[in-house]
């Protein structure tokens, strides 16, 4: 009973609602035109402030370009170990030069106490022998070897002589350089890749030894002279590079002591390299970049100091 009364009440309410909204039955409502008014939307400006971001660049290794400077090629020294090359049977030996193939030349005493030129190759030290027609096992030593295996040095009449006769060793044959001059006061000290040899020799017209250069072929000696054409203080050439620049020392004319000056010889001209303040200087080597090394006294007749200078092109 309760459920039925509720339903009747609901029907009455619905009927009353329809009667009030619908009006007369069969009459349609008038259409209404709705025209929306235009609305202009203007967005308010919004300021965007980005948060700061810290950028940390990755480290970049800078490798400097090579320069023509004596110090430019000096890098951190690698670790080396010393290897005993032995002797030719005697008490001592000295190595003076090594080429790019690792062949070493120098001098060693043998079991007969003779000082002999040697080559060390493939872990073996070998005696270079003597010049043809000379006394066997006379004193000799090798000072330089190039990458073609050509060796230069000097010899003496016995093991007590410091300087003897300069020679070149090529293809197993040792040849004299000074056959047209005196034979007992010369030495071949260096050779470049073109086979040009430098050293010093006592020429017949001089009282002291003079620097020389020898070109391949007949091995004849050419006098390089001195810093002053009238000087008789002597000179010596110690090294030559592959640009045919030669360095050594020459006496200073007009000085009773005959002070020595390091020189550079190129294009047929000998240039005085000066000193570090003292009277004497010596140039002992030059590389293919033109960097020269040697020694100079820094005070009168006193302490010597190694120097390095750049030859300007």
Image (cartoon, rainbow, N blue to C red):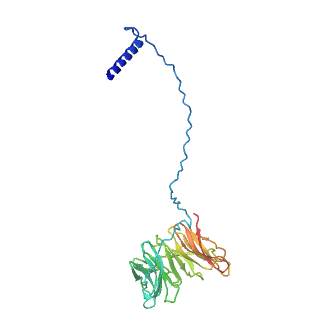
Q: Residue furthest bottom?
A: 112
Q: Which residue is drawn at 52% across and 81% down?
A: 186
Question: Compared with residue 297, is residue 41 higher up or lower down, i.e. above or below?
Answer: above
- From the viewer's perspective, is residue 190 above or below residue 9? below
Between 91 and 166, the residue placed more toward the observer is 91
Give the side of residue 181 with respect to residue 131, left or right.
right
Residue drawn at (56%, 41%), measured in percent from left and top? 49
- Taking depth in this image into account, of 92 and 259 the one nearest to the observer is 92
Picture coordinates of residue 260, whole percent (x, y): 62, 77
Quadrant assignment, res 279: bottom right
The quadrant holding residue 251 is bottom right
Q: Which residue lies furthest to the front in this view?
A: 1
Q: Where does residue 304 sit, x and y in percent of width and height?
A: 62, 78
In the image, 67: left or right of 131?
right
Name the residue rendered at 53%, 26% in the picture.
41
Numbered label tally: 0
Between residue 25 and residue 134, name the one nearer to us: 25
User: Can the viewer see residue 181?
Assistant: no
Residue 102 in percent (x, y) is at: 42, 74
Q: Find residue 24 and report its horizontal and vertical position in percent.
A: 39, 8
Q: Considering depth in this image, is 270 or 58 the residue closer to the camera?
A: 58
Q: In this view, does 298 lie above or below 31?
A: below
Q: In this view, does 33 lie above or below 124?
A: above
Query: In which quadrant will I find the N terminus?
Result: top left
Quadrant containing the C terminus in the rendered view:
bottom right
Q: Can residue 1 be seen in this view?
A: yes
């Amino acid at each position: 009973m309760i459920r039925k009364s509720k339903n009747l009440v609901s029907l009455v309410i619905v009927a009353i609602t329809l009667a009030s909204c619908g009006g007369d039955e069969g009459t349609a409502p008038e259409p209404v035109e709705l025209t929306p008014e235009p609305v202009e939307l203007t967005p308010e400006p919004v300021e965007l402030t980005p948060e700061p971001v810290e950028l940390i660049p990755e480290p970049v290794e800078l490798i400097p370009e090579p320069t023509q400077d004596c110090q430019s090629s000096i890098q951190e020294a690698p670790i080396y170990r010393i290897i005993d090359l032995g002797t030719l049977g005697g008490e001592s030996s000295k190595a003076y030069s090594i080429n790019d193939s690792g062949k070493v030349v120098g001098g060693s005493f043998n079991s007969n106490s003779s000082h002999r030129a040697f080559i060390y190759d493939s872990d073996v030290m070998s005696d270079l022998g003597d010049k043809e027609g000379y006394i066997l096992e006379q004193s000799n030593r090798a000072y330089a070897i190039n990458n073609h295996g050509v060796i230069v040095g000097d010899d003496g009449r016995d093991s007590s002589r410091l300087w003897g006769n300069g020679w070149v060793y090529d293809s197993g044959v040792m040849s004299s350089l000074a056959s047209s001059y005196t034979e007992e006061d010369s030495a071949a000290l260096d050779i470049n890749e073109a086979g040009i040899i430098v050293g010093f020799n006592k020429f017949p017209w001089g009282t002291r030894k003079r620097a020389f250069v020898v070109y391949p072929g007949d091995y004849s000696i050419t006098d390089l002279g001195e810093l002053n054409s009238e000087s008789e203080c002597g000179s010596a050439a110690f090294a030559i590079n592959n640009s045919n620049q030669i360095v050594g020392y020459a006496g200073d004319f007009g000085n009773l002591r005959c002070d020595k000056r390091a020189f550079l010889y190129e294009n047929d001209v000998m240039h005085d390299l000066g000193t570090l303040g003292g009277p004497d200087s010596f140039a002992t080597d030059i590389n293919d970049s033109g960097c020269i090394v040697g020694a100079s006294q820094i005070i009168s007749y006193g302490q010597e100091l190694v120097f390095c200078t750049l030859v300007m092109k």
